[in-house]
Image: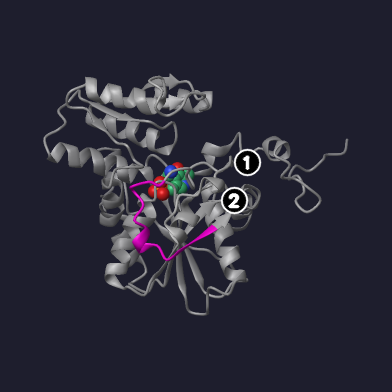
């Protein structure tokens, strides 16, 4: 936990206590006040620092880990980076089994952070021994004293946010928060934060943002797993093709779905209006706010907190690349390319 001092023992002291910043322009035509919890202020530049530190420290408390032991996970995304960072500082080996679809940049970044990366074929089914799930499971069984973070199925993911993000938001808003709106991937962030906030005030409305192509919203409404909802989409970290045990559906009031294209434009708009350089899912959450605003969800005096999970620098070859936007067909007559053509 961050303390009010000038020198810190290591980066782990800087995890959490991220700022809550008022949005002054992008939501100005919607009733209510909007505040963003900017998780890129964590030292690993995302909310995943919280779960990496919390889950590893819980294992330490239970006596599972000793110096030199191994932390295992199946992600090349933010969680992988955070686990690598915490592992380096605490003296553990970090092993990440990732899909061959992961970008070389991401794999290089994780290796730079000291992680041992197993690149597993993307085209095999989840129960194939070569899949990243199975490789991670096997390594976990083989290595005594190892911890498998397993973020989608680990309820400590919820607890991490229950003990940190929730109380922070409650204190930062002096208990005046009326709505929490957050993306749901593993569901850990929204579930843990919502559980804490609703214990303080059950009237707080909690809205999850889901992707078109994900089963989460439909499952929340019907409690049925509808395979027809599943198709490929581009936003990373949001939505899922399975039901994560790290999502507590009981504390979420409703879900809103957003498109890849709208979220991409909105992410760019956040940078241009607020000067906040944040990730693709931050675009998704504000896109959700716009849709909710149009549907009349918010009224004057509401205090709405949104979570911006990570930093824009991780998306330079995607949502912040004009070429990528163009290749996706996201630039059209309405959304002009952002580069000025210079006349010589
Ligand atoms: N945004 C990004 C960029 C993420 O990496 C994640 C985590 N998968 C989320 C949002 C959603 O957070 P959670 O997994 O806690 O639901």
Q: In the figure, residue 251 lies in which quadrant?
A: bottom left
The residues bearing labels 1 and 2 have C-alpha atoms spaced at a distance of 9 Å
Q: Nearer the viewer, residue 221 or 13?
A: 221
Q: Residue at x 70, y 39 (%)?
A: 328
Bounds of the magenta segment: 243-256
Q: Residue at x 75, y 51 (%)?
A: 335
Q: Check if mark 1's residue and mark 2's residue have beta carbons within 8 Å.
A: yes
SS at badge 2: helix
On residue 175, which mark appears?
none
SS at badge 1: loop
Q: Residue at x 26, y 54 (%)?
A: 4
- Could you tell me residue 292's position as x and y percent? 56, 67
- Image position of 244 with respect to 29: above or below: above
Q: In the figure, residue 234 lies in which quadrant?
A: top right
Dot 1 alpha-carbon crowd within 10 angstroms: few under 14, some 14 to 19, many 20 or more: many
Dot 2 alpha-carbon crowd within 10 angstroms: few under 14, some 14 to 19, many 20 or more: many
Q: Is residue 185 visible?
A: yes
- Could you tell me residue 207's position as x and y percent? 46, 63
- Write down the residue under mark 1: 320
**Residue 247 is one of the magenta-drawn residues:** yes
Q: Is residue 8 visible?
A: no
Q: Quadrant of the C terminus?
A: top right
**Residue 46 is one of the magenta-drawn residues:** no
Upstream in sequence: badge 1 or badge 2: 2
- Image position of 82 with respect to 69: above or below: below
- Could you tell me residue 106's position as x and y percent? 48, 28
Q: Nearer the viewer, residue 304 or 135?
A: 135
- Could you tell me residue 311's position as x and y percent? 49, 44
- Write down the residue under mark 2: 267
């Amino acid at each position: 936990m961050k303390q009010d001092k000038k020198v810190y023992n290591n980066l782990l002291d800087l995890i959490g206590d991220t700022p809550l910043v008022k949005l002054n322009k992008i939501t100005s035509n919607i009733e209510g006040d909007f505040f963003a919890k900017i998780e890129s202020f964590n030292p690993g530049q995302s909310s995943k620092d919280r779960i990496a530190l919390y889950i590893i420290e819980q294992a330490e408390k239970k006596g599972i880990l000793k110096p030199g032991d191994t932390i295992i996970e199946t992600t090349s995304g933010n969680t992988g980076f955070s686990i690598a960072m915490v592992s380096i500082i605490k003296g553990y080996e970090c092993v990440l089994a990732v899909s061959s679809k992961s970008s070389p940049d991401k794999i290089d970044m994780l290796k730079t952070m000291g992680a041992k990366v197993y690149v597993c074929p993307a085209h095999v089914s989840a129960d194939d021994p070569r899949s990243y799930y199975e490789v991670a499971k096997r390594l976990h069984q083989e290595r005594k004293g190892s911890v498998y973070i397993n973020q989608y199925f680990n309820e400590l993911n919820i607890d991490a946010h229950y003990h940190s993000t929730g109380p922070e938001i409650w204190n930062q808003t002096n208990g005046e928060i009326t709505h929490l709106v957050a993306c749901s991937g593993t569901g850990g962030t929204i579930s843990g934060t919502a559980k804490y906030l609703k214990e303080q005030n059950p009237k707080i409305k909690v809205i999850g943002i889901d992707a078109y192509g994900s089963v989460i919203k439909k499952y929340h409404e019907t409690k049925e797993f509808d395979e027809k909802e599943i198709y490929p989409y581009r936003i990373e970290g949001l939505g899922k093709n399975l039901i994560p045990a790290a999502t507590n559906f009981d504390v979420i009031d409703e879900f809103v779905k957003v498109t890849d294209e709208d979220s991409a434009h909105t992410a760019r708009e956040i940078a241009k209006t607020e000067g906040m350089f944040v990730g693709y899912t931050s675009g998704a959450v504000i896109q959700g706010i716009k849709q909710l605003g149009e549907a009349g969800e918010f009224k004057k005096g509401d205090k709405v907190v949104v979570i911006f999970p990570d930093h824009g620098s991780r998306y330079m070859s995607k949502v912040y690349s004009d070429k990528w936007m163009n290749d996706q067909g996201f630039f059209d007559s309405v959304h002009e390319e952002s580069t000025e053509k210079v006349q010589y």
